[in-house]
Amino acid sequence: MTKNIMSKEEYLNKSKELNIPLEKPKVLNDTDFITVAKERRSVRQYDAEYVMTEEEIREILDIAIQAPSSSNLQPWRFLVIQDKQTQQELLPIANNQQQIVDASAVIAVLADIEGYKSAERIYGELVNKGIMKNEIKEPYVASIMHNYGNFSAEKALSVAMIDGGLVSMQIMLAAKAKGYDTVPMGGYDEAKFVDAFNVPENFKPVMLISIGKGTKAGFEKVRLPLDTVLTWNKY
């Protein structure tokens, strides 16, 4: 039986029905977050002897995946490179940046351009939890499959990469909050990385993130004045 396909407007506005809070949003004291955001720096020098446990890395990633994503499709995928020999293999691919081997681990953030295929699983779980009614879920998922499945290659990549950027920032903030340092890296040969690490064709590299115990703080942040980058209402 053919499922009903919502118009784009219906599909986008239907998402309001997904949020059925039982209580008001929590009022948080944002002091700690502000401190973390301000103190996070790109750290390139690490204690090469420090070992992060799998549990610690998983905890940071579990926090990170609370990030928002387009239609909640969560297209991020992570390849954690923690074995020292494997980090050595990555070193020349990443332009011999020393943090690749000195950090406790390198997290490759990948974007799945076929992430929309998880829609049934994700929204089915909302039904199981009583958050969404099945009669809403069915056309909603059908609309996701139709809309995302018909994206151009360029559009699919753009959407997935934006979501990959969101989760990457959360990784770095979560790591800092847990006492670890990070540096995001785009300076690597993507083609060689994909080949050497057997990355599936539908997974596109977003960035590499070194994580561990920094031995020297990154340089002090210098930012353009807010008014240089801020415009109100229209350009």
Image (cartoon, helix red, strand yellow):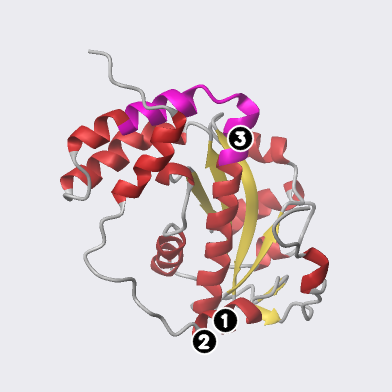
Residue at 46% x, 58% y: name it.
67
Magenta-highlighted residues: 140-159
Write down the quadrant of residue 151 in the picture. top right
Callout 3: SS: helix
Residue 107: % across, % down:
56, 56
Q: Residues within 10 Å of mark 3 (few under 14, many from 20)?
A: some
- In this view of the protein, which residue sits in the foreground, 79 or 221? 221
Q: CA distance from mark 1 to mark 2?
A: 5 Å
Residue at x 64% of width, y 80% of height: 38
Query: Callout 1, which amino acid?
Result: Ile
Report helix, strand or loop for mark 1.
helix
Work out how far the residue at label 1 is from the one at label 3, CA to CA, in angstroms.
31 Å
Query: Which residue is at the far front?
Result: 233
- CB under 8 Å between discs 1 and 2: yes
Q: Are marks 1 and 3 in contact (CB under 8 Å)?
A: no
Residue linked to disc 2: 31
Q: Position of residue 182 (x, y in %)?
A: 63, 69
Above or below, 77 against 65 in this view is: above
Question: Which is more toward the observer, 111 or 226?
Answer: 226
The disc placed on residue 34 is 1
Residue 142 among those drawn in magenta: yes
Please name the amino acid that badge 2 sits on: Thr
Q: Indicate which label's residue lies in the foreground, 2 or 3.
A: 2
Distance from Cα at disc 2 to Cα at disc 3: 36 Å
What type is the residue that disc 3 sits on?
Leu
SS at circle 2: helix
Determine if residue 142 is in view.
Answer: yes
Label 1 crowd (10 A; few <14 / some 14-19 / many >=20): few
Residue 157's label in the rendered image is 3
Q: Main secondary structure of the magenta part?
A: helix
